[in-house]
Image (cartoon, rainbow, N blue to C red):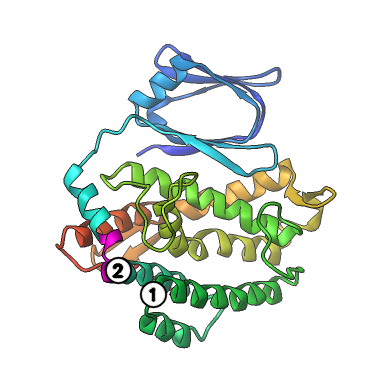
Amino acid sequence: MGRIYYLLSSGTLKRKENTLLFENERVRKVIPIEDVEEIFIFGEISLNTKLLSLTSSKGITLHFFNYYGWYIGSFYPRERNVSGFLEVKQAEHYLDKDKRLYLAKMFVIGAIKNSKFLVHNVDDYVHKVESSNGINELMSIEANFKKVYYESLKENTGWEFERRTKRPPENPLNALISFGNSLVYSVVLKQIYTTQLSPQISFLHEPSERRFSLALDISEIFKPVISDRIIKKLINTSSITEDHFVKDLNFVYLNDEGRRIFLKAFDERLRTTIRHRKLNRKISIKNLIKIECYKLIKHLLGEERYRPTVIN
């Protein structure tokens, strides 16, 4: 399996024979094609169809972010793992109220249980989720939990939060949360692409024309595991300070150095391994996301009831 490359500088990314070449006025770097699984592009990058043809043939996904670090979209290879039967089953589970609600509850329960590093007493919220009777009620419970969760994040970091603001983030802590969530979403989306799941059909979030909403569903489980833990660690170790942000009139975003620091921690976190009880071997957190997708497939096909991954 290849690794993730992060391009923060502007320049040209092109095909050089059967590999990749990134260059600008200061650097010329050959990227071995067999070493790449995903590329996160933050700078102003020029590319062409020859490059896209090569990355597509090698199964490489390109994720694009704008000047402020906000996710724009992804270029992913032509779908190879397509299953009409699984897509029908996925749609059936969305259209069936009880089947959809079960999966939606599992995503929220996974998110809540993985938030124990900040909110220790989560059992009350889990019980409320389990007894909820509809998606709207479930979303309300999740929203109430997140208020407590973000308040705890504020207390644990000592950074001002006030309220969750997304586009645009109004303070540094909100900016970190938005940046981290975009990264997690992108990685989850890539892992969905490697399976036969349809990224458009979701269960907790309503299917959307603008976002692949199944990636939003699965991201709920992994945001506390990946990005939120990174945020807490970087702030508490003073690896990121308020000097790493640009403050505009009505919003705040990470500067280039702040992004480099966060992306380094993000990459290390994805490669962190934990022992998987069922498989009885160490699995990287990145591979846990792929396993989560296959667990969902088994549920949709009626082979094994889905339960979310919980990391203590």
Tally of numbered tags: 2
**Identity, as a three-letter code, of the amino acid under mark 2:** Lys
Q: Is residue 97 magenta?
A: yes
Relative placement, left or right, of 31 versus 239 is left
Residue 282: % across, % down: 33, 59
Q: Nearer the viewer, residue 202 or 53?
A: 202
The crowd level at tag 2 (other Cα within 10 Å; few <14, some 14-19, many 20+) is: some
* Image-quadrant location for residue 154: bottom right
Q: Quadrant of the C terminus?
A: bottom left
47 to 232, vertically: above or below: above
Residue 201: % across, % down: 34, 51
- Mark number displayed over residue 134: 1
Q: Is residue 152 magenta?
A: no
Residue 116 visible? The answer is no
Stretch in magenta: 93-99
Relative placement, left or right, of 164 versus 213 is right
- Mark number displayed over residue 227: none
- Name the residue rendered at 48%, 36% in the picture: 74
| Whether label 2 touches label 1, CB < 8 Å | yes
Q: Residue furthest right?
A: 249
176 to 52, vertically: above or below: below
- Name the residue rendered at 77%, 69% in the picture: 160
Residue 203: % across, % down: 36, 61
Give the structural element (helix, strand or loop) at label 2.
helix
Counting residues from the start of the chain, the first of labels 2 and 1 encountered is: 2
- Name the residue rendered at 27%, 59% in the picture: 296
Q: Which residue is mark 2?
A: 97
The crowd level at tag 1 (other Cα within 10 Å; few <14, some 14-19, many 20+) is: some
Relative placement, left or right, of 193 versus 46 is left
**Identity, as a three-letter code, of the amino acid under mark 1:** Gly
* Image-quadrant location for residue 218: bottom left
Q: Quadrant of the N terminus?
A: top left
